[in-house]
Amino acid sequence: MSSRTMRTLAILLLMGFLAVAGGCGTGPSPEEEGVLASDRDRADAGAMVRPEVAEGSSAATGAEAEADAGVPRARVIFLGTSLTEGFGLEDPDSQAWPHRIEDMAREAGIEGIEVVNAGLAGETSAAGARRISWILRAEPDLLVVELGANDGLRGIPVDEMERNLVRLLDEVTAEAPAAAVALVRMEAPPNMGEEYTARFREAFDRVAHNRDVALLPFLLEGVAGDPALNLPDGIHPNAEGHTVMAANVWEALRPLLEQVAPGSHSADESR
C-alpha cells in the first residue's frame, strides 16, 4: 500500500471516528434529520469511511499497484451525504454514483483518476464544514461537494446553509488553493413552500458564482420520486438511480476531471 494511500486511510478513519463521537453529543436526533432519518442509523452504528473506499477507487488493488509503480493519479474526493455514500446499496463501492463517475471517466479515456468516497450518512452543510479540514489533509486534486439535502429536509434556514457552504469553500481556498472544486446543486423538497425552495435554489447559484466554483446540475433530476429508481424507503436511490445520478452531472464534471487527470494538456498547464 502506498504511503499516500495509508495517509488518506488514517485521516479519513479518524475523521469518521470524530463524526461518530460528535453525533453522540449535541448532534441532531434521528427525528430532527427529517425524511433521511435512516441516515443516522448508519452513523450511530459507527459510520466511518470504509477502508476500501478510503484507499481510493472501487478497484483499490489496481490503484495501489499504479501508485507503487509510480504512476501519477489525480485524487477526486466526493464529500456528501448518504446519497454520495451509497446508503442501502448492495455494493456501494462500485454502485454509488462517485464510483460510476470513475467508470465513466475510464470509458471516456480519462486515466489516472482515484475516487475517494467521503459521503457520510446524515451529513449537513454545518457538519461538512466542520470536517473539511480533515478532508483536505487527504490532498484532493478535485473536491466535489454534495451537501444540502439534509438541510432542506430539516428546514434549516437557507442563510445558515449558505454561510456553511461559503465557510467550507473559503477553507478549501485557504488550505488547498490548487484544488479544483465543484458544488452539486441540491433542491429543497416542495413541501417546504415556494419561498423556501426558491431561496434554497438561489443560494447554490450565489455561492457558486461568488466563490467561482463549478455548479453541477441537480443530482436527483429524474430520480427523486420515481419508485423504479429508489429503494423501498422511497428516499435513497437504488443502483439504477445512482447510474442516472452520475449521468446527470457527468457532462459538467467531465472537464474538471480532464483538467486534473495526469498527462492531460489542461492538467499540465495548471501545475
Image: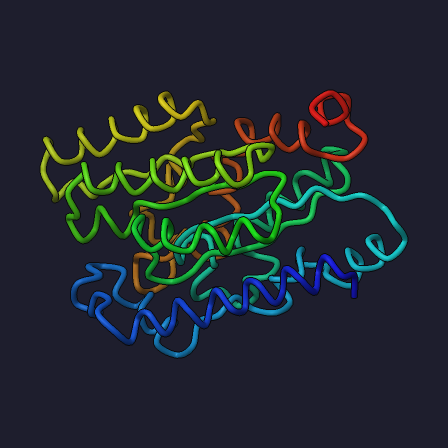
* Residue found at the far bottom of this picture: 45
- Looking at the image, residue 203 sits to the left or right of residue 157; the answer is right
> Residue 69: horizontal and vertical position, in percent?
90, 53
Colour setting: rainbow
Q: Quadrant of residue 88?
A: bottom left
Check the picture and name the quadrant holding the C terminus. Answer: top right
Up/down of 171 relative to 124, above or below: above
Q: Where does the image place residue 173, in percent across and percent down from the top left?
A: 48, 34
Residue placed farthest to the front in the image?
174
x and y percentages locating residue 259 in the rendered image? 67, 27
**30 is higher (above) or lower (below) than 150:** below
Q: Considering depth in this image, is 249 or 205 the residue closer to the camera?
A: 205
The residue that appears at 47% across and 51% down in the rendered structure is 133
At 57% across and 65% down in the image, what residue appears? 91
Residue 185 location, quadrant: top left
Compared with residue 242, is residue 54 higher up or lower down, i.e. above or below?
A: below
Give the mark count.
Answer: 0
Q: Nearer the viewer, residue 26 or 101?
A: 26
Q: Is residue 188 left or right of residue 115?
A: left
| Residue in front for this viewpoint, 96 or 125 | 125
At horizontal 41% and vertical 35% (from top left) the residue drawn is: 170
Determine the residue located farthest toward the right in the rendered image: 69
Quarter holding the N terminus?
Answer: bottom right
Task: Give the x, y percent position of residue 221.
Answer: 37, 37
| 26 vs 144, nearest the viewer | 26
